[in-house]
Amino acid sequence: QKEVEQDPGPLSVPEGAIVSLNCTYSNSAFQYFMWYRQYSRKGPELLMYTYSSGNKEDGRFTAQVDKSSKYISLFIRDSQPSDSATYLCAMVEETSGSRLTFGEGTQLTVNP
Amino acid sequence: DGGITQSPKYLFRKEGQNVTLSCEQNLNHDAMYWYRQDPGQGLRLIYYSQIVNDFQKGDIAEGYSVSREKKESFPLTVTSAQKNPTAFYLCASSIHPSSKYTQYFGPGTRLTVL
């Protein structure tokens, strides 16, 4: 079983839709949670990060962590064609330095 | 401009050859990382280095080697012992080994074995 599971998609939505991207994990020691966005043939860029359970909002993006369910989500409101990319969740334990464990990524297409 | 550069962008290798991928950063970051990305597998850690002249194996180090002689540079050699080297290789750095979030990625090198 993978430590981090992420639905690979692909996910296709119309412009303006609310998008929900999700990851589940099995390691209860994960404390820090991140979302990266990766455009085609580019390196990932850090989009959002949260520590432990709770919500964090940044513009059209909201990251949500539910440690009791071992479940994290990224919501994108008013999605735009420029949001079309692969979204990777990543997480790290408190004691493992900065070694990230990644999900496999969800490919999102927002259609104009 | 500060950032991470990787070269070349595309690399072709014949079977049985070693090849070295370049990664340079001018962010003054202490820690550097090499990942491999395959379709359906996400990013997997190959090697990482927290300080100059020191590095540790990641989850899939077999068939790879690295060096860290300078803070700015962390080259990765894909040896002929790597059985399936065709992949997208990503280099990353973070300001400090304990910084949990801030890994910055380079643009990647796509290696194809012919």
Image: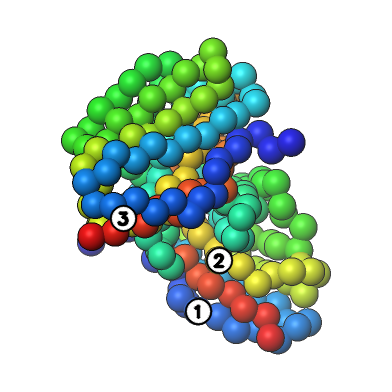
Q: Is residue A109 above or below residue B17?
A: above
Q: Which colour scheme is used?
A: rainbow
Subunit under mark 1? B
- Camera-near label (2 vs 3) is 3
Q: Is residue B27 above or below residue B75?
A: above
Subunit under mark 2? B
Q: Which kind of residue does numbered mark 2 sit on?
A: Phe
Q: What is the secondary structure assignment of the residue under circle 1?
A: strand
Q: In this view, does A35 lie above or below A42?
A: above
Q: Of all residues shown, which one is farthest toward the top?
A: A68
Residue annotated with mark 1: B10
Q: Do the residues labelled 1 and 2 touch (CB within 8 Å)?
A: no
| Picture residue at 39% right of the left edge, 37% below the top | A20
Q: Position of residue B19 (x, y in %)?
A: 64, 77
State the separation of the CA atoms marked 3 and 1: 28 Å
In this rendered view, identify the residue nearer to me: B51 or B24. Answer: B24
Subunit under mark 3? A
Residue annotated with mark 3: A110
Q: Say few, some or many: other residues with alpha carbon within 10 Å of mark 1 (under 14 / 14 to 19 / 20 or more).
A: few
State the separation of the CA atoms marked 1 and 2: 9 Å
Quadrant of image for the N terminus of chain A: top right
Mark with earlier residue (1, 2): 1
State the separation of the CA atoms marked 2 and 3: 25 Å
| Picture residue at 47% right of the left edge, 28% below the top | A72
In this rendered view, identify the residue nearer to me: A3 or A82. Answer: A82
Q: Are marks 2 and 3 on the same chain?
A: no
- Camera-near label (3 vs 1) is 3
Residue annotated with mark 2: B88
